[in-house]
Image: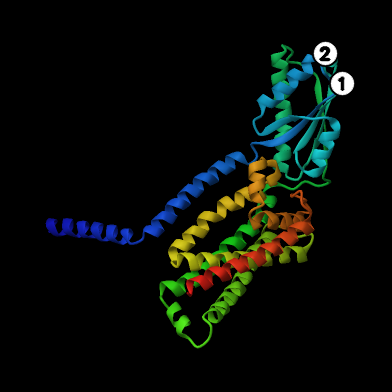
């Protein structure tokens, strides 16, 4: 009895090793997904940790310089950038910085003689999470500054001015961006598995030998998949509207962006399915790619606040432009330096390009 148990365990062990050795691609993609999640964790650390704040100092005194130094070292969620008032006004208007802190000309004099000084703060309150970070940073910096100069009872006031007339909480911002991720996961996985299944079950050979072009039945399948994916997207959209009570300001623009996203991601899924030719590995690949692309494309906060490298790489994905459109259509927020019309043209361009790439990849697999 004991020998039979050991033999069965050993046999199962050997059988699984053989099975895994035949699935090297799947193991590679699973490992790639693990790496992608490590990158995801890193992206969570990077986003929101390098958002730039302009400091306009109208005072050349030592106390003003010391306060700027304290502000830069006290709160680690931002990158302090000294600017002139003209450059700062231009930067915050174009969306390149989170806020402008203006130090008055009498700052050092007021600190020296224990008089109250007012620090002006202009905030791009596109996301209340970042606005609250600014609000938390300043009192902390003021307290640290007072301790440094030996005056804990320093009298500094903060006068905040918001650029946008309404606040958008962090969760509503994330949820709306999440619709783009839903479109990616649903459309890409359904299309990828549809195409991969044809190769995996070898039914693609029947398509090749059929009297019609093999692309025709496949196009029909993809069209059906697109229809199902579009219908499936109605569910998360209703959850956003009725569950989270987030009503789009421009419903047509919302529907347009999500539909085009579904088409783009469906084409991407077709290309991946034809390339991988296996259902489970391609599903793992899509899931592994979805979250990193989502995080670094302005879905958590405007990508322009996350540093040039992330902002530049965000332009290389359709998610960046889709988030720009859905945030404007739902919340009226302009989260990309590009106009909404530019984002829409870019999204349509992505749709045409992804369709062309999918067609090329599939045609090559039929040769």
Quadrant position of residue 219: bottom right
The quadrant of the rendering that contains the N terminus is: bottom left
Identify the residue at horizontal 47%, vertical 63% (top origin): 282
Camera-nearest residue between 362 and 297? 362
Q: Is residue 119 left or right of residue 343?
A: right
Residue furthest to the front in view is 367
Q: Is residue 225 left or right of residue 248?
A: left
Q: Is residue 346 above or below residue 125?
A: below
Q: Where is residue 57 in the image (x, y as percent from the top left)?
A: 82, 24
Q: How is the image coloured?
A: rainbow
Identify the residue at horizontal 54%, vertical 66% (top origin): 271
Residue furthest to the bottom in view is 211
Q: In this view, does 174 lie above or below 238?
A: above
Identify the residue at horizontal 47%, vertical 52% (top origin): 33
State whether residue 266 appears in this view. no
Residue beneath disc 2: 114
Q: Earlier in the sequence, mark 1 or mark 2?
A: 1
Q: Residues within 10 Å of mark 1 (few under 14, many from 20)?
A: some
Quadrant position of residue 118: top right
State whether residue 61 appears in this view. yes
Q: How far apart are marks 1 and 2 (CA)?
A: 15 Å
Q: Where is residue 276 in the image (x, y as percent from the top left)?
A: 46, 64
Q: Position of residue 155 (x, y in %)?
A: 80, 19
SS class of the residue under badge 1? loop
Q: Which mark is residue 6?
A: none
Q: In this view, does 96 lie above or below 71?
A: below
Q: In this view, does 55 lie to the left or right of 230?
A: right
SS class of the residue under badge 2? loop
Q: Where is residue 218 in the image (x, y as percent from the top left)?
A: 54, 78
Q: Residue 105 carries which label?
A: 1
Camera-nearest residue between 129 and 320? 320
């Amino acid at each position: 009895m004991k020998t039979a148990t050991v033999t069965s365990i050993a046999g199962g062990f050997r059988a699984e090793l053989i099975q895994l050795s035949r699935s090297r691609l799947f193991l590679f993609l699973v490992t790639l997904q693990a790496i992608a999640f490590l990158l995801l964790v890193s992206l969570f650390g990077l986003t929101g940790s390098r958002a730039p704040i302009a400091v306009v100092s109208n005072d050349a005194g030592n106390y003003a310089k010391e306060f700027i130094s304290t502000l830069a070292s006290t709160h680690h969620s931002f990158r302090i950038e000294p600017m002139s008032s003209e450059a700062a006004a231009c930067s915050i208007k174009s969306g390149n910085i989170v806020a402008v802190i203006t130090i008055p000309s009498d700052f050092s004099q007021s600190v020296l003689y224990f008089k109250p000084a007012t620090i002006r703060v202009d905030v791009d309150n596109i996301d209340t999470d970042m606005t609250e970070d600014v609000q938390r940073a300043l009192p902390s910096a003021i307290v640290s500054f007072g301790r440094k100069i030996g005056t804990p009872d320093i009298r500094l006031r903060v006068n905040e001015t918001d650029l946008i007339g309404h606040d958008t909480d962090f969760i509503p911002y994330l949820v709306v961006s999440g619709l783009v991720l839903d479109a990616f996961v649903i459309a890409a996985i359904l299309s990828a598995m549809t195409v991969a299944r044809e190769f995996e079950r070898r039914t693609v050979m029947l398509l090749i030998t059929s009297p019609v072009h093999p692309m025709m039945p496949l196009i029909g399948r993809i069209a059906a998949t697109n229809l199902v994916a579009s219908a499936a997207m109605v569910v998360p959209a209703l959850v956003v509207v009725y569950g989270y009570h987030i009503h789009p300001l421009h419903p047509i623009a919302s529907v347009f962006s999500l539909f085009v996203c579904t088409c783009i991601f469906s084409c991407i899924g077709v290309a991946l399915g034809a390339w991988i030719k296996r259902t489970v590995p391609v599903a793992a690949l899509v899931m592994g790619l979805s979250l990193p692309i989502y995080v670094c494309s302005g879905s958590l906060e405007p990508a322009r606040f996350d540093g040039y490298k992330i902002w530049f790489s965000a332009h290389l994905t359709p998610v960046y432009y889709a988030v720009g459109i859905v945030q404007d259509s739902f919340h009226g927020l302009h989260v990309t330096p590009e106009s909404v019309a530019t984002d829409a043209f870019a999204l349509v361009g992505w749709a045409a390009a992804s369709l062309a790439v999918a067609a090329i990849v599939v045609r090559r697999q039929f040769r």
